[in-house]
Amino acid sequence: MLKSATDNTNLPKPTILIIDDNADNRLLLGSQLSMNGYNILETESPQEGLIIAKNQLPDLILLDVMMPIMNGFEVCERLKSDPITQLIPVIMVTALRDLEYRIQGIDVGADEFLTRPHNKEELLVRSRSLIRLRKTQLNLQSERNRLKLLHDVTQAINDTGLNLTPTLNEIMMGTKEVFEATRGNLFLLAPDGTLTNRIVIHEDSSIEHIDNVNQQIFHDGLAGRVIEAQTSVIINDTATDSRWLKFPDDAGDIGSAVATPLTRGEATEGILVLMHRTPGHFQDADLELLETVAGQVAVAIRNATLFREMDEQRQRMEVILSRSSEAIIILSENQTIELINNATLEAFGSDLIKHIGKDIKQVKRLNQLSPLFKAQDATHQSIEFPLPPNLTYFASLTPIPNVGYMLFMQDITLRKREEALKLEQARIENIQLKETFSRYMSPSLVEQVLEHPEMMNERKKQDAIVLFADLRGSIKMILSQTPENSIEILNEFFEKMTAIVFDLDGTIFDLAGDELMIGFNAPFQQEDGTAKSIETAIQMQILFDELQKKWDEEFGVLLGLGIGIDKGQVVMGNVGATRRVNFALVGEAVHTAHRLVDIALDGEIVISDSVYQSGHLEKTQGIPADHANVVFESQGYQHLKGKPRPEPIYKATVDRK
């Protein structure tokens, strides 16, 4: 923070940090220094000393050399390599007198050496000298920061164009740094004095722009007082000053604040407010620089406003002078043609220039534009119209104050063709998408996907019912049959099973080898998902009886079917590599259902407790009504592979006879 060069009143005492593992040494040094007006911080731990130095930034450090874990040379090297602490002077206090140790100390950045037993006067002289040197360095750094801030503000103002935001952000960051402020606010005002925007720089130097500002707090608080008095204000203690009102989104403690108006002539463009958590942080000497910065910020804001107004005027002049590559006709307030640009002549014919001064409705070539002039409401202010031989134009009519109207005509032939191509491409993609999802979804679910294709790209958690159907004895069948027979059997199995799944609105998430993985209540919500999963399992077992007999007669193989079902939370989304992805289910329910199908024997359906409870499958009731012979009975608690503890499971056997 900037201080007056002549103001020495109420200056804080210099602080000296003593890092020494010997308590007697710390006591001797501390007592001698404190008696001469120094604040003393001390620690026996080198590690703690590094932390204190970084947080407290003492004016001087007295550092013992011979310490356990980390010696003084290592501590000094760390202090001097850290940008935060590298300017703090270090006196190494040691009983080591050899030249090599002094050279080592100089090498790691020590500023002075004090040999034990030390001389008190030498201690005080060297301490005063180094502290004076540190203050000089800080003053020089402060002055450099001051000059840099003024340079940066001037440079930012020179670079200001239409986009004022980066300039103000840069100024806020530089101002916060130079004044060592904790946070800051820049309030921007409209010409009528109303608050339009609030730029906040937080403690971490992040910038936030807030449009919705509490006007009452603004006008009743410090900023409002500054506007009213048109003078800078310092609040030394916000806790006791009624002028300080805290915004609802202000975080952390505020001890002091300074505010200055952004004034340019008689106009006030805004208010600049800096805050610090410590009371009394800002001094009168700070105001001169802050007011200079505020004045330049006001100039930057005004320059940006003028620049924007000039740019808008320039754009209007470009339209009037017909510099646009689009077809433009300028009309008077009574709709007579005042100006036709070259693009219009190229589109409608060069002889159109003869119609300047005529009512546009009298020009037959422009009759297609007549709907624009039949009503004054906005619904008739734009139209599309064809232009021979095969072009399409878009026309819009825009009022120009004090001029009349601008008729803007744009060739959209290419855009229309692109739209047609996109529609055709979308139709083809829709067909391809439908064909793709029809492979593992029922028609009703496919229609839902087509209506909401974005759902297939979502990644989300959702409760789902997962069913695994596993073909028993398939390995033996493959080994005993020809490849043609094996593929025929597997294809027939999958064909029949998937038909049942689609009839009951299930989704096939995986079909591989001799196993099906089916999901219900996924990807779309199904209130009856549990019941549909059970009905699917039963119908699969019933139909499988026919397949069993058929395969036995034709191929002499005996196959079985086991089914496992679990309900729980899963993660849905596209899973795979860059070139190949699947919409998949991943989660505990998938793992559990797969363990349950491993337990199921031929003709059996094994379900988890979550399925049993959600489906109300009491033993006396059976499920559903059409399959009264299918009853789920408790199998007690069983330990499933990969599960931390046993879980209750239930099993039903479907009688296929």
Image: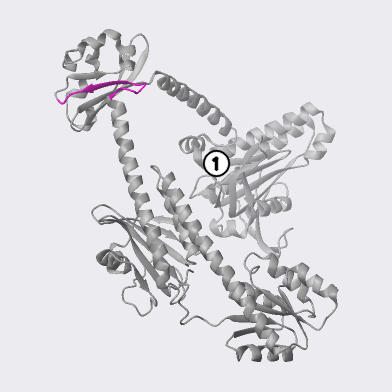
Residue type for callout 1: Asn
Is residue 363 visible in the rendered image? The answer is yes
Number of marks: 1
Residue 243 vertical placement versus 114 (above, below): above
303 on left or right of 60:
left
Instruction: Quadrant for the C terminus, please.
Output: top right
What residue does disc 1 label?
A: 457
Locate residue 90: give its quadrant: bottom right
In-front residue for pair 374/431: 374
Residue 51: image x %, image y %? Answer: 65, 74
Question: What's the residue at 65%, 85% (across, down)?
Answer: 124
Q: Residue at x 62, y 80 (%)?
A: 128
Q: Secondary structure at mark 1?
A: helix
Badge 1 crowding class, 10 Å Cα cut-off, few under 14, some 14 to 19, many 20 or more, is few
Residue 58 visible in the displayed image: no
The region drawn magenta spans 321-333
Q: Is residue 47 above or below residue 626?
A: below
Residue sitting nearer the eye, 598 or 20: 20
At 60% across and 89% down in the image, what residue appears? 36
Query: Image height check: is 353 above or below 317?
Result: above
